[in-house]
Amino acid sequence: MRLVLAVLLEQRLEWRHGYDLLKQTGLSSGTLYPLLMRMTDGGLVEAEWREPAKVGRPPRHAYRLTASGIALALQLAGSSDVLSGREALA
Amino acid sequence: MTKTFPHAVMALALAIVSAERRSWALAMRAEFDVAAVEGGALSFASGCLVAAWRDRLSHARGRFVPGLYALALLLMLPMAALQIGCAVLGLPYLYPGQRGLAGAMLVGDAHEALLSGIYLSAVPSLVLLQLMTGLAHLRLAWVLVEQDWSAALDWALRTLAATIALIVFMGVLFLDSRQVLLQGLVVGIELALIVIVARRHRSLWPTSDVERTG
C-alpha cells in the first residue's frame, strides 16, 4: 500500500488510470486492484469514471488520493525519510 | 486461441466479482483493453482473476455462494453417487463385508433356504428406496445452489423420510442396518446444515426473502 500511496502522491492532483499505476508500481493486477478497492473503501483514494482520450474506447476508471490519503502518504513518506536518514548516519 | 484465452480468463474474473463490486469489474474490463493493446492481456486478466477471488473471499457475502457449491459438490453429490451406485449395483455397500444382498441373505448357510425367498421379494423395494434417496440427494444439491430454501428443506425431509423407511424396512427383515443408519446420520447433518445456511442467508441479506444471490 505504501508504494501505491507514494506513486499517487507524486502527482497528487492528477487522475491516474489503473494500467498506468500497474506499470509504474510494477505490481500485478491481482495485487493492485484489491489494494485500490480497500483504499477506496477506507477513504484514502477516490475513483471516478473518466472519458477516454480516444474516441470509440470505453470510459476508464481513474484514481487519485483524497485529503486523508494525501495526509497518510505524506506521513509515511516522512517516516521513511527519517528512517533512511538514520540508516545514512549509522 | 492466443487472443481468446485471455478474454476467457477476463470473462471468468468478471463473473466472479460480486454484485457490490460491479463498478470495479467494469474498471478492470476497461483497463484490460489497454493491456491487450500493449501485449499484456493474459497477465492482466490472470491478475484480475486473483483479485476477484481475493475480494470475494474477503467478506461474508462473497464466501456464501462458494460455500453452497462446496456443500453441494463435496457432500451432497458424493452421497447421491454412493446411494444411486448402491441401488444400481445391487446394494453392494449396504451390508457388512461388502458382499451385497447375497451376503446379507446368508448364502451358503443352512437357513438360506428359509430366508432367501423373503429377502429376494424385498429386494425391489429396498433398491427403489435406496434409489429414491440418491435421486432426492441430487435434487437437494440442485435446489441448494439455487438458494431455494423451502424446496431444500422439503427435499432434505423427503430424503430423511426415505432413509428412515429404508432403516425400518431393513430392521423388519432383521438385516444389519448400520450402513443405512450412517446414511441417515449424514442426511440429518445435511438437514441441520440447510437450516443453518438458510438462517445465514437471511442474516446476510435481511431485506430479500426471494432474491437470489450470485
Image (cartoon, rainbow, N blue to C red):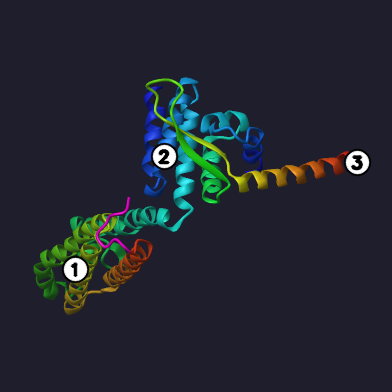
Q: CA distance from mark 1 to mark 2?
A: 41 Å
| Dots 3, 2 in contact, CB < 8 A | no
Residue B13 shows up from this direction = no
Tell whether label 1 touches label 3 (CB within 8 Å): no
Dot 1 or dot 2, earlier in sequence = 2
Please give the range of residues in magenta.
B207-214
Q: Secondary structure at mark 2?
A: helix
Q: Is residue A8 left or right of residue B55?
A: right
Residue position for label 3:
A89
Chain letter belonging to callout 3: A
Q: Residue B126 at x, y = what percent?
A: 15, 67
Residue B27's tag is none
Residue B158: mark: 1
Mark 3 Cα shell of 10 Å, populated few (<14), some (14-19), many (≥20): few
Which amino acid type is marked by label 3? Leu
Mark 3 secondary-structure assignment: helix
Q: Residue visible at 55% across and 33% down?
A: A15
Left or right side of A76 for B179: left
* Residues flagged by tags 3 and 2 on a common chain: no
Q: Amino acid at mark 2?
A: Ala
Q: Secondary structure at mark 1?
A: helix
Looking at the rendered structure, the kind of residue marked 1 is Arg
Residue B212 belongs to the span the image colors magenta:
yes
Q: Report the mark closest to the observer, 1 or 2.
A: 2
Q: Which of the two residues, B20 or B165, is positioned nearer the viewer here?
A: B20
Q: Residue B136 appears at what percent x and percent y?
A: 20, 61
